[in-house]
Image: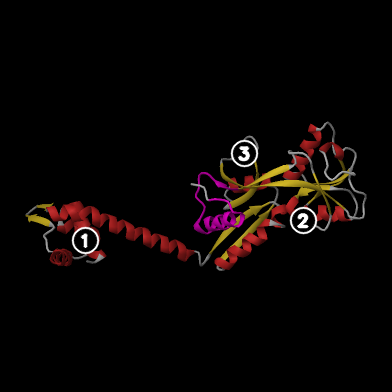
């Protein structure tokens, strides 16, 4: 029994006419009829009652039809899946991520992904979460690592939470410690010189909002930098900065934790709700979830 024979049989069963079936399949009618006869001999039963202008299924044909359709559907699915995998030999994935994650999480994930799919070109857009949300919604990215919850009025995105990360204060090892306790309260930042990120960084918004909730405005000695610049300014003794724990661990700076649940952030992977990411991007998302030990959600 051949797939071609089953395809011919299913088409004749659908249109109930050999000539029209042959036209639909773009084959000669005698060839189609011969293949059906061969199939019937192999099965040991006639599949059609043949009467002029009236083709109907026999009991054997009725029994075979749902099986044939299932086999043909499974074959098509297998072909499509193999082609999807084959396409991962070439392609591109556009990932957006905040600088703090580009300096910590992203390199390890991209290394694993590149080892598995060396033919896929990786494009990384480094920026603040708010900027990335806009770029993602506009179709400029396939995936983005963002900070949740999203702001009111944000575009419709599908998000999966990945991890909760503590924010910490970093200061120059040679500078005086922020306080004498092991942990900081947000109120302890009052009056301390701080180095602050440019506008559009979630870290700026989180820190400023926490200070205002504690009843004061933060004092900036330098502001407007990207992650590397901010760490450099702190290292030079210009003030302390509030950064993610993953970044602080690699900075070589003094790290002081906060004793305040507000000084945390939630990181999620996002894509547009109205568009399924391409296969290469879905594989990158899967590698990211594997790396963090997060279970795949049903999408």
Residue 228 percent location from the top left of the image: 79, 56
* Quadrant in the rendering for residue 118: bottom right
Residue that carries the numbered disc 2 in the rendered image: 249
**Looking at the image, what colour scheme do you see?**
secondary structure
Residue 23 percent location from the top left of the image: 21, 59
Residue that carries the numbered disc 3 in the rendered image: 154
- Is residue 143 found left or right of 168 in the rendered image? left
Q: Earlier in the sequence, mark 1 or mark 3?
A: 1
Q: Are marks 3 and 2 in contact (CB under 8 Å)?
A: no
Camera-side residue of 228 and 61: 61
User: Which residues are the magenta region?
Assistant: 269-295
Q: Residue at x 6, y 54 (%)?
A: 52
* Element marked by disc 2: loop
Q: Are marks 2 and 1 in contact (CB under 8 Å)?
A: no
Of badges 2 and 1, nearer the viewer stands: 2
- Is residue 271 found left or right of 125 in the rendered image? left
Q: Are marks 1 and 3 in contact (CB under 8 Å)?
A: no
**Mark 2, other Cα within 10 Å: few <14 / some 14–19 / many ≥20:** some
Residue that carries the numbered disc 1 in the rendered image: 8
The N terminus sits in image quarter: bottom left
* Element marked by disc 1: helix
- Is residue 26 found left or right of 83 in the rendered image? left
Residue 179 percent location from the top left of the image: 89, 44
**Mark 1, other Cα within 10 Å: few <14 / some 14–19 / many ≥20:** many
């Amino acid at each position: 029994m051949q797939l071609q024979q089953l395809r011919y049989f299913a088409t004749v069963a659908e249109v109930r006419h050999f000539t029209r079936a042959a036209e639909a399949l773009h084959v000669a009618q005698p060839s189609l009829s011969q293949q059906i006869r061969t199939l019937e001999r192999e099965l040991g039963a006639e599949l059609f009652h043949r009467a002029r202008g009236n083709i109907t299924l026999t009991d054997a044909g009725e029994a075979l039809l749902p099986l044939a359709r299932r086999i043909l559907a499974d074959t098509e699915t297998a072909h499509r899946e193999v082609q999807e995998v084959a396409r991962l030999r070439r392609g591109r994935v556009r990932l957006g991520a905040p600088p703090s994650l580009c300096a910590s999480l992203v390199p390890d994930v991209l290394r694993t992904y590149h080892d598995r799919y060396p033919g896929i070109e990786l494009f990384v857009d480094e920026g603040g979460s708010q900027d990335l949300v806009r770029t993602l919604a506009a179709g400029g990215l396939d995936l983005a690592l963002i900070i949740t919850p999203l702001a009111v009025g944000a575009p419709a995105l599908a998000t999966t939470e990945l991890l909760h990360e503590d924010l910490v204060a970093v200061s120059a090892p040679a500078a005086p410690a922020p306080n004498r306790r092991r942990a900081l309260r947000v109120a302890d930042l009052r009056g301390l010189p701080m180095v602050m990120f440019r506008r559009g960084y979630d870290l700026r918004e989180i820190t400023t909002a926490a200070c205002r909730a504690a009843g004061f405005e933060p004092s900036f000695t330098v502001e407007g930098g990207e992650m590397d610049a901010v760490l450099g300014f702190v290292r030079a003794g210009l003030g302390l900065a509030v950064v993610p724990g993953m970044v602080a661990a690699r900075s070589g700076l003094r790290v002081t934790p906060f004793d305040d649940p507000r000084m945390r952030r939630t990181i999620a992977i996002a894509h547009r709700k109205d568009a399924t990411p391409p296969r290469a991007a879905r594989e990158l998302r899967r590698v990211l979830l594997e790396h963090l030990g997060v279970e795949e959600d049903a999408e």
